[in-house]
Image (cartoon, grey):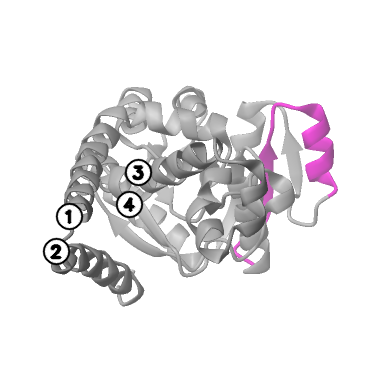
Amino acid sequence: MFPQVTIVGPGLLGASLAMALRARNLSERIVIWARNPERIEQCMGMQWCDRAEEDLAKAVKGSSVVVVCTSVASISSLVSEIMSHTSEGMIVTDVGSVKGPICASAVESARGASGAFVGSHPMAGSEKSGMDHAKADLFEGKPCIITPQEDTPDNATQGARAFWEALGMKVYSMSPPEHDRSVAHLSHLPHLVSSSLAHCLDATPGEWKKLAGRGLLDTTRIAEGDPGLWEQIMAMNKSHLLDSLSELENSLKLARERLENGRADELREFLETGSRFRKSLENTDQ
């Protein structure tokens, strides 16, 4: 049980987090921080919000856990402000999809602070965005990566782990650089590929869309994600994403060569490798 939890930013993840905390009876008081007065009023009408504040210092006061659920571009500045208002034992974490820059900034912000910062990345998003699409089971059974650093107190690391596990997540620990390399391949590159395919097909005759089947809908589903948010994520993880993109370009070049040379066995081998990898995802205990 976490007596009071503050959620900074009631978007898809923030609102889903509040719903999950309430549904699992994990917190007596859930406080929401939002910039917009209309959003504050909206949150106050929700069963999962006990109090909503526009003042960040008031929002975090008395909380054992503070979770920053805003866009990646704004997380560092918010964490910096929050750390100046922390109390002893308070854990500050986030949901950012890129950890290197956020964690590096937090190291400086946490110097002399009473609380501690532990980077987190619950991999439980959706192509939809906003509070209207939030749901209480968004995190259940999904992986969450925490990124403690050398000077992160053990009790804060364990507290962050316990928080996400209490929400039903499978928690893994990585360094910020390892996290950013892995998600560049497993999350950011797939989104770029999905968007690239949709971008390519946008130039085809409009009447062809009526012929689109399940395969196209599946492969382009995540391209529907908020372009503004994804531009921030890709820009922040640029170097690792470019590395993964180079690897994809090599695979595409190989596929083209095998298609052009007309040797069915080589093309089949290429397709079988992809098929094996896809099947292995379903057998992985995340």
Question: How packed is label 1: few (under 14 Cα within 10 Å), some, or many (20 or more)?
Answer: some
Front position among marks 1 and 4: 1
Where residue 262 appears, x then y in whole percent? 18, 58
Q: CA distance from mark 1 to mark 4?
A: 25 Å
Q: What numbered label is drawn on residue 111? A: none
Give the quadrant of the C terminus: bottom left
Marks 1/3 in contact by CB < 8 Å: the verdict is no
Query: In the shown orientation, is residue 231 left or right of residue 263?
Result: right
Of circles 4 and 3, the one toward us is: 3
Is residue 26 on the magenta stretch?
A: yes
Q: CB of mark 2 within 8 Å of CB of mark 1?
A: yes
Instruction: State whether residue 93 is above or below residue 83.
Output: below
Secondary structure of residue under mark 4: helix
Query: Amino acid type of disc 1?
Result: Arg
Measure how far apart labels 3 and 2 are at the Cα level.
25 Å
Q: Secondary structure at mark 2?
A: helix
According to the picture, the residue beneath numbered tag 1 turns out to be 258
Report the residue marked by disc 4: 186
- The residue labelled by disc 3 is 189
Residue 18, located in which quarter of the rendered image? bottom right
